[in-house]
Image (cartoon, rainbow, N blue to C red):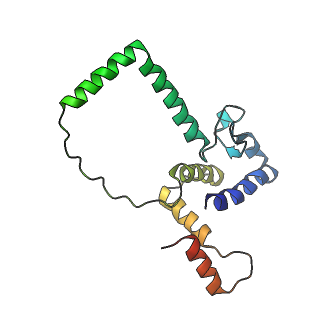
Amino acid sequence: MIRALVLPYYRLLRSLPKTDPSLRQWRTRCRHCGLFFLTYFRNAWRTDLYCPFGCREAHRKAASIKRSTAYYQSREGKIKKQALNRQRSLVSPSPTPPPLPREPIPWPRDTVEYVRAVISQIEGRPFTLPEILTLLARIVRQHRIARRRRRDQIVAWLNEFPP
């Protein structure tokens, strides 16, 4: 599903500098996967950025694990971890309230936020999250270019996005 969203976006992103040369300075490559993405103009020429399509989150998690491991292997970290474990065993567990139900987003939240930021930059006005979700839902629901009967199109869409 993500591939269906990213490929047309990537084609559009590669063609933007031809139509609007001022956007060329905002385009940069991901350090990990090499995909182009738009960034803030102050970060445009940096080579250590990660894309919002998963590389950024994966790098953040890996760095966090590395920092945490290094800290808890140090003398101060071992003492603190022992104190935390001791405190946790003394406190009786209290029932946590159930989380408030949130309507799930059919796409990764980071990707939707990135699309919102890019569209806001291109259009020159702020977009809200519900506006972007309705826009993405409308784009996904568009009929394919291939000629099919309407019934076949609906069946294919339902197989791809079951109710």
Q: Position of residue 76 (x, y in %)?
A: 38, 14
State the count of labels. 0
Left or right of 28: which side holds 91? left
- Residue positioned 65% across, 35% down in the render: 49
Q: Between residues 146 and 123, which one lies in front from this camera angle?
A: 146
For residue 145, above or below residue 54: below
Between residue 117 and residue 147, name the one nearer to us.
147
Residue at point 72%, 40% (across, down):
29
The x and y percentages for residue 7 are 71, 58
Asked if residue 27 is positioned above or below residue 45 in the image, the reply reads below
Task: Point out the residue furthest to the top here.
Answer: 75
* Left or right side of 139 for 15: right
Q: Residue furthest right?
A: 18
Q: Position of residue 47 (x, y in %)?
A: 71, 32
Give residue 62's quadrant in the image.
Answer: top right
Q: Is residue 136 above or below residue 52?
A: below
Percent across and percent down for residue 37 are: 68, 45
Front one among 110 and 22: 110
Give left or right: position of 120 versus 163: right
The residue lying toward the viewer, choosing from 28 and 33, is: 33
The residue at 49%/56% (across/down) is: 129
Q: Residue at x 61, y 58 (%)?
A: 2
Which quadrant, please, contains the N terminus? bottom right
